[in-house]
Structures are given as structure tokens and as C-alpha cells.
Amino acid sequence: MLEQLKNKAPHWLGLVPFVFLLFWMSVVYLNHDFLWNDELIQFVRSDGTMDGPVDYGRILERVRGSQSWPPVHSLVGAAWATLAGWSEFSVRTSSLFTGVLVVPITYQLGRVMFSRRIGFIAAIMVSTTAFFAYYLHEFRGYTLYVLFSAMSVLFYWLATYRDHNRWLMRILMSMSLLALLHTHYGAAFTAGVIGVFHLFLSGKRDKHWLYTLIVLGITALAFLPWLTWALSGVLERELGESEGIDTLTLIYEWGRAFSNGIIPLLIGLVAFGIYRADKEVDEQEADNKAMLFSMTWLFLGALMLLTLNGYISFLLHIRHGIGLLLPAVLIMAFALDRIMQWQPIITIAILSIWVGLGVVYNQNFEYMYTFTETFRTVKLDSLRTGIEFGGQCAADDDLVVFMHAEDNPATERLIGGPMAYYVGDSIQRFAQIDNIMDMRRYNPNSGFLFHAPDYATMFAETTADAPIMWVVGVERPVRPHFFLGEFNALAADAYEYCGQVVRNDEILAYAYTNTSTVTCEFPEMGTVELAPCAPGLIQGGDR
């Protein structure tokens, strides 16, 4: 397929299979899991929980003060959902389509900066990077982040090193940069790299250089109104917190994320690309300049993010630096192109391994869960089955307590809000082991359910007058689940353990009660009667 780039046939046609591959890898997951905590926050900020027409002024007020997200994604999401609807599937398609657009834009970026073949290789690598593909099925702004990053650099390069339509390219560069800066604050490193490169490394000092510099300055000034209005108080709050990932972990996990888990491959290709660019300084001046920019983009950009994170701990996850993926694949594509000129079979073999790993990791989210602060979500079908079970088996005055698929308090805190959102206006009381409070008290604007300051008091208030307490695992645990110790002890004091009611591929459920008999009618199980109830506890790992 790579050989066709030597012909006069449209080169972009070779990308079509990879565009469809990325689309397929993502579309199958659009309705796979529920809107988890960060998605729900974006959903609320985009006016998704309100009746009637979208209020864009209200969106701006909600986004103001966000540590990471300026308004562009919320505005785009609201506009998209107004047309497509507010379901999980429909809102996530906005990320899907913007993510797919990254592939042809990356091709154009590589083609303009280097060559068609390098653009082609870079586009293949982006389309099959599992870390990037994951965010095509989430209602988040990370695909917009990458898209606007690529567009900003593409139009800057055209305005600086091409003689056609320079003013149009400058205008498009400014618009792309403003869209990028208003999408994610962490993306500002790309704008910073463009400014530094243009001032000190571009090699241009003519009138066109000056015009582009003026446009860059105007763009920076145009971002200041939002920056000063929206970030008031945020910096002070962030300076007082220390939640960011440490520097070595960030570098290591960026390496894994941008190499489909093969860090030696990333290091080897980047090193070889830098070596070849240095050797070709007199032979391929254009490629050398493009490599200089790509290296500046990758290394200076990472340094900017890491330095800022040292003062303001905003890098809670490596995804906040996802724009670094673009210079990484450009440098690797340059290296693979030079290897191809020597031994084509090596390039083909490396790309085949890359594509294969991207597909495999995309089909198994365990790869994503290995990154720091990446939490397991809950399958939407499992959650709905759990809610249906509560509706069928629990009386109006009963309590249904959700249990997550792993005993991680941080995970339960982050999925508590989404569970409360899906429970909605249920008659039954729903709670969660780690957040033992009535989910009907949940406020979507709070982001998530907070830990109770006094667990015993909250347990007593939440279980008050509930004759039966149902404990429902909304997804079969992937490992033996240990109930929260305090919950176990309090349940033993207040109830008798009745045993297991339901166990299937979607949920498992147990009952505690003060009555002598528990009866449950659930479609998958028929009528289940547990009697008599006997004192006891569910033991950790008991299946």
C-alpha cells in the first residue's frame, strides 16, 4: 500500500481503510458504558440535564472556573446534541467524528511539513494509537484538542513556508489557535511552541514573518478576555492543591501511551529520526526545518507542561498532554520513512505490529486501566439491569445499595454521581457502599457524591426504616470484592443476612433484612424466596 505513494493516483485513498478501522474501533463502544463522572460533568456543563432550549449563556457560566475546560467543547456538544439528541450514543458521536477528522488532517500536516509518504505513515499511526482511539467513544473534548492542535500547526506552516494564500492561512491559523486555547488550557503549549519557533527558529525575518508574528500576537490578546474572566480564583485554588502526577510517571506513561505500549520503539525511532535529520542538514533543508519544529513541539511542549505542573498540579492524567501525540508520530514517521528507503520490509513490519497492537488494546480496555488515574466504568446494560432489579424486587421503603466491580474507593466516588444520575426519579432509595447516602439527594452540578464525614451516621440515616437492604453488584466483579469494612459491621448490627438472590453475567445481588422472609420476582430468575434469614456476613471473595 505504501508503494502506491510513488504513483500519481490520489494518495489519500490509501488512508480510507484506516479511517474506517478507527471508526469501527470506536463506534462499537459508543453505547457500551455509562456516562462516567467526567463525561457527566461535561454533559451538565453542556446543558444536557435541562429541559427546553439550550442556554449558551448558562453554559459559559458553568464552564467558568473549570481547571481544564474552557467553553468550546461544551458549546460544540450542546449544538451537536440539539441536532442529534442527548443520549449516550448521540453525544459521543461528536467525539467520534472529530476524532476521525484527525486522520486526514494529520496526513495533510505530514505531507505539507515533510512528504506525502511521511504524512501517510503518521496518519496510519494516529488512527491506530489505542490511547487516542479510546477518547473517540467518550463525551470529552480530547479529540477536539488533537484536531485543533493539528490544524493550528498545519495553517502556521502553510502561512510561513508556502507562498499561496498566506493571509487566508494566517486567518485560519488564528481561528484554529483560538479554538484550541478555548478547548483545553493544557493545549496552550502548542501555541507557545509556535510562538517560540517563529521568533527564534523559523529562519524568517521578512515582511511575511512580521505579519505572521502580528497575527500570533493578536490571537494571544484575543484569548486574554476569557482567560482573565474564567480563571479568576482557579490558579489560587490550584496552587494550594497537590494532585498532579509526578514528573517521572508522566514521562513514562506518555511514552507508553504514544507508542502503543512499546516504549523502546518510541525511543529508538525518535533517536533515529533526530540522527537522520542531523545528517541531512545540508541535503534536505525543508525536512530538517520540519524536524526541528517537530522536536521543539515534542520536547519543549513537554517541558512547558511539566514545568507548569510543578507549580499548578493540573496534570491529573496524561490525557491532558494528548496533543504531544502529534509531534511524536511525525518524528517516528520521519524515521520510518528513512528506514523504508533502506529496508522497506522493516518499516512494513513495524507498522504492522503498531496497527495490530492498536486494534488489540482497543478491544481490551485493560490497557487503558493501567494508566494512573484511569478508572473502570460500568457497562450500561449492567447498570440498567441493576436498576431494573431494584425496581422489581425492592419495595418503596427498601434500600438498594450499589457495589462496583472492584474495591477501589476512588472509583466508587467517581461513579457515584453517574449512578445517581441514571437512577433519576426512582421511587426506591438507591445508595452506594462507599457513599452511603440517598442518591436522590445528588446534585449534578456538584460533579460527584462526596464521602460522608461520619459514615455511621450516614448509614443510619440512609437505612432508616428500610426493612430490606439489597446489595447489588451492577457488574460482575473482575476480582473478589471486599465490602467496605465499616459497611459490613454496621450491616451486621442492623440486619440479618439473607443470602444471594441473583447471580448472572450482568449483576449479583444479596439481601439483608429485619423480616423473616424475603421474596423477589425478577424476570431472569422467576420468584426467589429466601427464608429464614440468618445472621451472617458476606465474606470477601465469596462466590
Image (cartoon, rainbow, N blue to C red):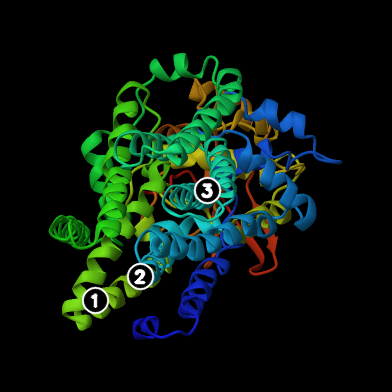
- Tag 2's secondary structure? helix
Disc nearer the start of the sequence (3/2):
2
**Label 3 belongs to which residue?**
148
Disc 3 residue crowd, few under 14, some 14–19, many 20+, Cα 10 Å: many
Locate the C terminus by quadrant.
Answer: bottom left
Locate the N terminus by quadrant.
Answer: bottom left
**Residue 268, image x, y percentages:** 16, 60
What is the CA distance from the residue labelled 1 to the residue labelled 3? 29 Å
Mark carried by residue 121: 2
Q: As rendered, which of 333 and 524 lies closer to the eye?
A: 333
Task: Assess whether mark 2 and mark 1 are in contact (beta carbons under 8 angstroms).
Answer: yes
Q: Which residue is drawn at 26% across and 71% down?
A: 337
- Tag 1's secondary structure? helix
**Residue 170, image x, y percentages:** 54, 44
**Residue 505, image x, y percentages:** 52, 67
**Label 1 belongs to which residue?**
347
What is the CA distance from the residue labelled 3 to the residue labelled 2? 20 Å
Q: In which quarter of the image is residue 354?
A: bottom left
Q: As rendered, which of 143 and 199 lies closer to the eye?
A: 199
